[in-house]
Amino acid sequence: MILYAVLLFVFSLLLILAGVMTCRGSYDLIYDYSINGVNDLKRYTKANGIAMICLSLPLIACGVLFWVQPEIPFALIGLGVLVVGIVVAYIFFHRIQTKYNGGMF
């Protein structure tokens, strides 16, 4: 479980780095078909970067829980937190995409 926690921390740090880069206006990390119909690219990249950073938060919370209590009941709670966090992040990405691009594709 400790290795899993470390992997979650590394992956969340990569997501935070990608989110900060996207927040600063680097749209190279976003697929081209996602930005085809976007009129306000600055706001879109900022919102997308913030959503990436929000996606890393449940990964950090799950990693901390696995690090502190590496037992099966806490692992299941951590996985629940992870699934809920990913669903909420997907909702954020979906709202951003429909607001700035008119749809998912």
Image (cartoon, rainbow, N blue to C red):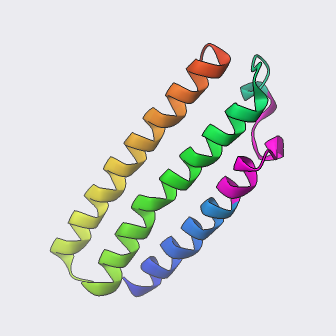
Q: Residue furthest left?
A: 73
- Residue 29 counted in the magenta span: yes
- Residue 4 counted in the magenta span: no
Quadrant of the rendering where the N terminus is positioned: bottom left
Q: Position of residue 64 (x, y in %)?
A: 36, 77
Question: In the rendered image, which quarter is residue 33 located in?
Answer: top right
Residue 52 seen in the current view: yes
Secondary structure mostly taken by the magenta-highlighted segment of the chain:
helix
Question: In the rendered image, which quarter is residue 36 located in?
Answer: top right
Quick check: 89 above or below 78?
above
Which residue is at 61% across, 62% downward?
Answer: 16
Q: Is residue 98 left or right of residue 43?
A: left
Q: How many marks?
A: 0
Between 4 and 50, which is closer to the camera in this rendering?
50
Quadrant of the rendering where the C terminus is positioned: top right
Which residue is at 24% across, 84% downward?
Answer: 69
Quick check: 34 above or below 30?
above
Q: Position of residue 43 (x, y in %)?
A: 69, 33
Residue 104 seen in the current view: no
Q: Position of residue 55 (x, y in %)?
A: 49, 52
Between 68 and 26, which is closer to the camera in this rendering?
26
Q: Is residue 46 left or right of residue 26?
A: left
Question: In the rendered image, which quarter is residue 53 located in?
Answer: bottom right
Which residue is at 55% across, 45% downward?
Answer: 51
Q: Residue furthest top?
A: 102
Q: Which residues are magenta?
A: 18-32
Q: Position of residue 95 (x, y in %)?
A: 50, 26
Quick check: 14 above or below 48?
below
Q: Is residue 86 left or right of residue 72?
A: right
